Image (cartoon, rainbow, N blue to C red):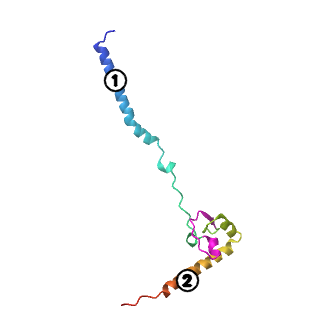
Amino acid sequence: MKDTNADRLLASLTRAAVIAAALCVSAASPALAAEDAPAASQTMSPLPAPAKGEFDNSCTMGLASGQVVKTDCSINWTAPDGKVYCFSREASKETFLKNPSENIQKAKEFFLAKDLAKDDASTAAPTAAPA
């Protein structure tokens, strides 16, 4: 087999074509991947915002019992009027639901009394006399 100039030329052109094709594919890959990738809003839904409950997210049953227990409001109940009430535990929610209107009223009374006591304490605080 004799190597001719035509064979060398053909081999060089083939190599050049293969290299050019490889470069085109590698350059186009990121663009193709971006087109195929679903939009972020389609694939990753943000976490739902935590519920914003009545009484500053305090446990409603706790307030009805005379205690302030802060919650993240992950355990909650929505009343027919659309208000959201938070609970520290499922057991508190179950107890609350035995008589929701009475427990809401007790919680309101305690919550308001607590706020009034806080306001009274801040107005009764002595002020420093000028020196």
Instruction: Please state which amino acid type lies under the numbered disc 2.
Output: Ala
> Which quarter of the picture shows residue 16?
top left
Is residue 61 magenta-colored?
Answer: yes
Residue 47 lies, with reference to residue 121, above or below; the image says above
Which residue sits at x=67%, y=73%? 101
Magenta segment boundaries in residue numbering: 59-78
Which residue is situated farthest in the front direction here? 131
Specify the label residue 114 is tagged with. none
Residue 4 lies, with reference to residue 75, above or below; the image says above
In this picture, residue 78 sits left or right of residue 10:
right
Q: Secondary structure at mark 2?
A: helix
Q: Quadrant of the N terminus?
A: top left
Q: Secondary structure at mark 1?
A: helix
Calculate the distance from the C-alpha at mark 1 to the C-alpha at mark 2.
88 Å
Residue 100 location, x and y as percent? 68, 71
Mark 2 sits on what residue?
Answer: 117
- Among numbered discs 1 and 2, the one appearing first in the sequence: 1
Residue sitting nearer the eye, 127 or 63: 127
Mark 1 sits on what residue?
Answer: 15
Which residue sits at x=52%, y=53%? 45
Is residue 67 magenta-colored?
Answer: yes
Q: Are marks 1 and 2 in contact (CB under 8 Å)?
A: no
Label 1 environment density (alpha carbons within 10 Å; few <14, some 14–19, many ≥20) = few
